Amino acid sequence: MKNLYAIWVDHAHAYLVKADVNDVVSVTPIGSDVEPHHHGGINTNEHVTIANQNKHDERRHNQMHEFCKVLISHLVNPDEIAIFGPGTAKNELRNELEKVSHLASKLSQFETTDKMTENQLKAYVVKLFGLPRI
C-alpha cells in the first residue's frame, strides 16, 4: 500500500488525512494562526484605511505561507497527495506544494468541496483514492 495523504484546508484550519499501509485512515486536525479576513477599517481617512488593509493582507499572506509550510512538513514520504476544501486556501497550499520539487509531482487530486465532518472526510478520502471500504 502507498502512503496517501489528503488535506482539507481553509484559512482557519486543516485536516490531514492519511491512509497507511494497513488501509487505516487517520484524521489529524491542524489549527491555523491566519487572521480572519476583514474589509475596510475604522478610520475615516480612506488612505489610512487602504494602507491598513494592505498591511493586514500582507500579514495574512505571510501567515498563510507559514501555515502551508506546517502542513507540508506533515507529508512524510508521500506517494500521492490530494488537496481539497471550500475556498482559496487550497490554491495557496497547492502553490506552496509545487515549490517543493520532490512533492510537486505527487499531487494527484485537487478539488473544491464543502466543509465535512471527520467521518465524511474519511469516506471522501477512501473514495478519492479508490481504497477498500474501511
Image (tube, grey):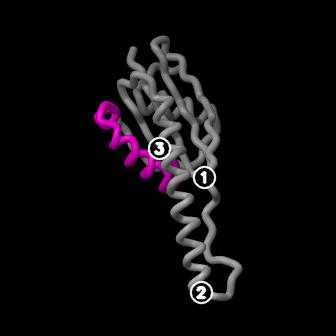
Q: Nearer the viewer, residue 15 or 98?
A: 98
Q: Amino acid at mark 1?
A: Val
Based on the picture, tell me whether residue 110 belongs to the magenta stretch: no
Disc 1: CA contacts within 10 A as few (<14), some (14-19) or many (>=20): some
Q: Position of residue 95 (x, y in %)?
A: 38, 48
Q: Which mark is residue 34?
A: 1
- Rendered residue at 63%/88% (across/down): 45
* Count of numbered tags: 3
Label 1, secondary structure: give it.
loop
Residue bearing mark 2: 46
Disc 2: CA contacts within 10 A as few (<14), some (14-19) or many (>=20): few
What residue range appears in magenta? 84-106
Residue 99 as seen in the image, left or right of residue 59: left
Whether residues under marks 1 and 2 lie with C-beta atoms below 8 angstroms apart, the answer is no
Q: Amino acid at mark 2?
A: Glu
Q: Does 125 sit above or below residue 41?
A: above
Q: Most extreme residue toward the right, as rendered?
A: 42
Q: Position of residue 71 (x, y in %)?
A: 51, 37
Label 3, secondary structure: give it.
strand
Q: In 3D space, how far apart are the residues under numbered discs 1 and 2 (Cα atoms)?
A: 25 Å
Residue 96 as seen in the image, left or right of residue 59: left
Q: Amino acid at mark 3?
A: Phe
